[in-house]
Image (cartoon, rainbow, N blue to C red):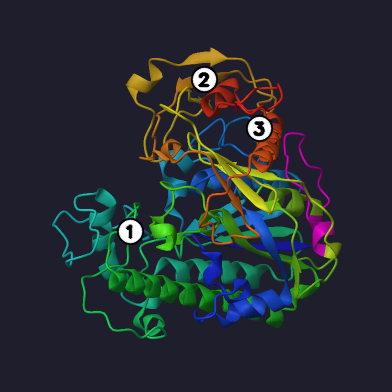
Amino acid sequence: MRVIMVMFDSLNRRMLPPYGGDWTHMPNFARLAQRTVTFDNCYIGSMPCMPARRDLHTGRHSFLHRSWGPLEPFDDSMPQILRENGIYTHLSTDHYHYFEDGGATYHNRYSTWDFHRGQEGDPWIGQVATPHIPETVASRGDHPRWRQDWVNRPYMRREEEQPQPRTFDAGIDFIRRNAQADNWFLQLETFDPHEPFFSQQHYKDLYPHEYNGRHFDWPPYRQVDESDEEVAHLRYEYAALLSMCDHYMGKILQLMDDLKLWDDTMLIVCTDHGFLLGEHDWWAKNNMPMWNEVANTPLFVWDPRSRKQGERRSQLVQMIDFPATILDFFGIARPSAMQGIALGDTIAHDAPTREAVIFGYHGGAVNVTDGRYVYMRAAPGDNAPLFEYTLMPTHMASHFSVAELQHWQQVPPFSFTKGCPLMKIPGRENHIGRAVHEQGHLLYDLQADPGQTQKLDAPEVEARMTVLLIGLMQANDAPPEQYERLGLPVAAGVSSGH
C-alpha cells in the first residue's frame, strides 16, 4: 500500500477543465478526472499557506486559535504518525515557507525530504549588486522578495532549472526507486501556480494574445485597478503556468501507468486554496471576502480499494479529511484530536460526511457553508478581542516581537493541547494587512447565484447558518473571545439581535 499526494499552491479551480475551464490547455487534468473521483464541494479550512498545512498534518482547524505558525509540540502530525507506524514518508517540495521561522517544524516530521530553491523571492542566490528589473505593472518596489526574485530568475532560464520541474523530478526519482517497496507515503508539493507566474515561452505560446504593455506576472494583493488589457494578460500568464503544472502532472499519471501503481497506490491531487484573477475586481487572496474562487478548491482522489473513476462526489470535504483518509488507508488509528473524516466510503459510494464546514483566517471573517449557502460572519468595530494561543511564538518570517511578548499570559489547556498550558498573546488586528472585518456579514445562495454577485437578504437562512457556525466553533473549542469578536452567543440561542 502506498500513497502519492500531489499538492499545488493557489489553483483556481474554475480554470481547470474538469471544473468547467474551457479555454486552458490542460489535457492531463482532464485525464486525471477520468482516472479518479472528482470532488465538487471541497473547501479550505485554515488560511493561507502554512495554516493550511497545519490542517493537513493535524486533521483539525487552527485558524480560530492561531495565525501563521509552526506545528506546535502538542500537535499530531500525520506524516510523523505514519513514520512511527512503519510507513516511510518523504517530502519533495519547492515551497520555501517550510524553511522560514513560521514553518520550520513541518519538514522534519517526514522520514526524508528534499527542497528545491528559487520560488517567489526565496532568499537563494546571494548578490550584492542591484539586479536588472524591467518596468513592471504593480511593482513591489523595495520589498526584499521583489528584489530577490529578479536576482534568482537568471539562474532559472531553462525549464529544467526551475523549481517545479526539479521538484517533480525528485518525486519521480523517489517513486521509481521505491516502486517495488511497500508502505510509503510521498508528498510531492510544488509552489506553482502561486505568483509570480513565471513559465517558459512554449507554455505562453499556448495563449497567443496581443500585449505591448509593461511586464506583469505578479499581481498585487488588492483590488484591481489595472486596465482590461493588463488583466487579460495576467490571466494568460497564470494559464501558461497552469499548463506547465499540467505537463508535470501528466508525468505522474504516465509513471503510474508504466509501473502499474494504480493497483495498490492511492493518488490525491489537491491545493491549499484558490486564487482570484480579477473576479469580483480583486487580485489574489487574504484581503477580500472568501469567495469560492479562493474557498472552493479542486480535489481528485484515486482509491485502489474501491477503484472508482470518472465519477463526481458532492459531499462537503476539507483538507482536515486528508490525514484521516491516509491513516485509514494504512489501517492506522486516528488520534482523538483529529477531527477529519476518512473519505474511503465517500469515494466508494458517496457516503455522507457532514452538514456544514467552517473556514477562514485568524482575525478575519469566520465562514460557514452547507454546500447551498455560504455565510461570512465579520467582526464589527475594531476586530477585538483577538489573541494568539501558542508555545511557538513566530510569525511567517520572524519571531514575535519583544513588544508583543511583553504582554502574554499563561492560560489553561484547550481540549487538543494534551494538557499543555499556552501562551496567550494579544493578536494584531490586521496581522497580514487585512481589514476584512469592514466587509459586514455576507450571505450567498450558491444555487441561485454561483458567482456570488448578489448579497442575499434572508434572515431565517442567516439565523440557521449562524447556528451551524456556532456549533462548528464549539466543536473546534474556539476561545471565548472569538464569539465576542464576532458578536455571537457562546452557548445561548441565536436571536434577531445577533
Q: Which residue is drawn at 68% across and 74% down?
A: 33
Q: How crowded is mark 3: few (under 14 residues within 10 Å), some or many (20 or more)?
A: many
- From the image, tell me which residue sits under label 1: 224
Displayed quadrant of residue 484: top right
Which label is found at residue 81?
none
Q: Which of marks 1 and 2 is nearer the N terminus?
A: 1
Q: Which residue is drawn at 68% across and 20% down?
A: 419
Q: What stretch is highlighted in magenta?
A: 329-347
- From the image, tell me which residue sits under label 3: 473
Q: Is residue 270 magenta?
A: no
Percent x, y for residue 90? 61, 56
Q: Is the magenta stretch mostly helix, strand or loop?
A: loop
The span from disc 3 to disc 1 (Cα, nearest Å) is: 33 Å
Local SS, label 2: strand
Q: Residue at x 78, y 55 (%)?
A: 343
Q: Which of marks 3 and 1 is nearer the N terminus?
A: 1
Q: Mark 1, mark 2: which one is toward the viewer?
A: 1
Horizontal side of 177 relative to 168 (left or right) equals right
Report whether residue 29 is seen: yes
- From the image, tell me which residue sits under label 2: 423
The span from disc 1 to disc 2 (Cα, nearest Å) is: 39 Å
Q: How crowded is mark 2: few (under 14 residues within 10 Å), some or many (20 or more)?
A: many
